[in-house]
Structure formats: structure tokens, C-alpha cells
Image: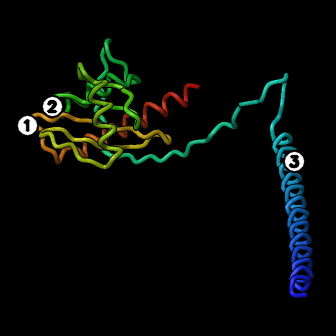
Amino acid sequence: MAESNLTLLSEPIILILFVAWVLVLIWLAGLTLFLIEIYRKIITLSRKDMKVKGGRKDTRREPRVASVKAEVKTPVEVTTSSEQSPNDIPGMVGRVKAKYNLNGLTLATGDGLVIATTEDDGEKIAARYSHLFRLGKIPNEEGVEVFGTNLMGLEIIGIARMTGETQSSSLHNIKGDIDSALGSLVSDKVTHI
């Protein structure tokens, strides 16, 4: 009789476990269907957002409008000759180099590409010091000054190699001359368009 009681007790437990297992499977199936429906809606919305023209995805972007911040400081003394145009960035860099008696002057983009240089190895200088400037590190070479400026949203890095006669206090004036000259070059180009 003890064996029959054990068999009777085990049958309802098995039945309860079977019902619970079936309910869990039904719940998982419902959850899967719900997630599939969400996925379909996301795909439908993303297809509506993509404009397809000629069977290819339209990858054109809206043009960005850059904000212009101009600070006019000490103007550059522009001396024009038949060789130099006042609208010439390399000529402007050469004039600033001569004005402050620098060993070299390089202007580069924030990612290290040369805009203008008076150096033979300007590409190396631009890449190295732009990288250091972006990391916030000050170069540990004597006579090398690095500064940053911004022209119409473009980060410009200046690298000035000073002579013994050039004072590091003139860096502010060098930066001001470059800002002023670049601003006037850009405004000349904009008015001639």
C-alpha cells in the first residue's frame, strides 16, 4: 500500500511540471513573436528613411554651415611685390616668418596636414606637433612654440621655430598676425565669389 501512495503522489507533481513547462513554452513563443514584430517595424521605418534613387542609396548629406568667429588683433604688414600676392597663404607665412625673425613657421590642420610651411621637412613637423598639440602635450624642444587657432570651424595648428633673438612673448603677436591674415584672406575670397 505504501507503493501505491507514492505513485499517486508522484502523478500530480508530474502533471504540474508538465503544465508549467507548456506555459513557459507558450510564453517564449509569444515573446519571440513580439520581438519579430518589433524588428519588422524597425526595418520598415528604416526603409522609409532611406531614399532610394536609381536603385542605389542616396548618400548625399546636407551641407554644414560653419560658424565664423573672428578676433582681429595686430594686423599683418602686407608688402606686395611681383612675386608675392596678398592673397597667398604661403607668402603670408613667409612674411610672418621674416617679420618675427623665425627659423621656421608651419601652419597645419588639426590632423597634421600641411597648409603652408617655410621648412624643408614641414610635413614631418606638421604631423608631429599637431599630434602633440591635440594630446595637450607641450613640446620639450627649446625654441619650438605650438599654438592653435580656428578659422571657420577648421582647427589650425601653428608651429613656430624661434631664433635666439625671438622672444617667446611675441608668440601672442605671431598668432594675432596669422589670425588676422587668414581672416582677411578668407573674407577676400568670399567677396570675390
Q: Of the two numbered discs 2 and 1 on the same chain, state the one appearing first in sequence.
A: 2
* Of the two numbered discs 1 and 3 in the rendering, the one whose residue sits closer to the viewer: 3
Q: Residue at x 92, y 82 (%)?
A: 8
The residue sitting at 49% across, 34% down in the picture is 187
The tag on residue 40 is 3
Name the element at disc 1: loop
Estimate how packed mark 1 is, as few (under 14), some (14 to 19) or many (20 or more) residues with alpha carbons within 10 Å.
few
Labels 2 and 1 touching (C-beta < 8 A): yes
Q: Tags 3 and 2 in contact by the CB under 8 Å rule?
A: no
Q: Label 2: which residue?
A: 101
Horizontally, residue 165 falls left or right of residue 22, namely left
Q: Amino acid at mark 2?
A: Asn
Locate residue 37, reporting x and y percent: 89, 53
Give me the disc on residue 93: none
The tag earlier along the polypeptide, 1 or 3, is: 3
Q: CA distance from mark 2 to mark 1?
A: 8 Å
